[in-house]
Amino acid sequence: MTKEEELIKDTEQLKQLISQVDNSGISAWIAGDLLKTVKIKEGYKSKFKNF
């Protein structure tokens, strides 16, 4: 899977998490973990200079 494909997949997961936000904090934890993964893998660099 290319970095761009991974970024698209992670972005879609984030969109789904945001749409099902709850008060338990679990969605926020998972979203934060996904954002960390995107930053570490630098998948955003194909379209953006920085995170």
Image (tube, rainbow, N blue to C red):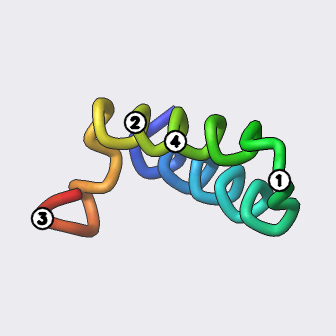
* Mark 1: amino acid: Asn
Of the two numbered discs 4 and 3 in the rendering, the one whose residue sits closer to the viewer? 4
* Mark 3: amino acid: Lys
The answer to which quarter of the image holds residue 21 is bottom right
* Mark 4: amino acid: Gly
Of the two numbered discs 1 and 3 in the rendering, the one whose residue sits closer to the viewer? 1
Q: Name the residue under label 2.
A: 36
Of the two numbered discs 1 and 4 in the rendering, the one whose residue sits closer to the viewer? 1
Disc 1 versus disc 4: distance between alpha carbons? 15 Å
The 10 Å Cα crowd at callout 3, few under 14, some 14 to 19, many 20 or more, is few
Front position in the image: 27 or 12: 27
Disc 2 versus disc 3: distance between alpha carbons? 17 Å
The 10 Å Cα crowd at callout 2, few under 14, some 14 to 19, many 20 or more, is few
* Sequence-first disc among 1 and 2: 1
Q: Mark 1 points at which residue?
A: 23
Mark 4–mark 2 CB contact (< 8 Å): yes
Q: Where is residue 4 in the image (x, y as percent from the top left)?
A: 43, 51
What label does residue 32 carry, if any? Answer: 4
Q: Residue at x 62, y 37 (%)?
A: 29
Mark 4–mark 3 CB contact (< 8 Å): no
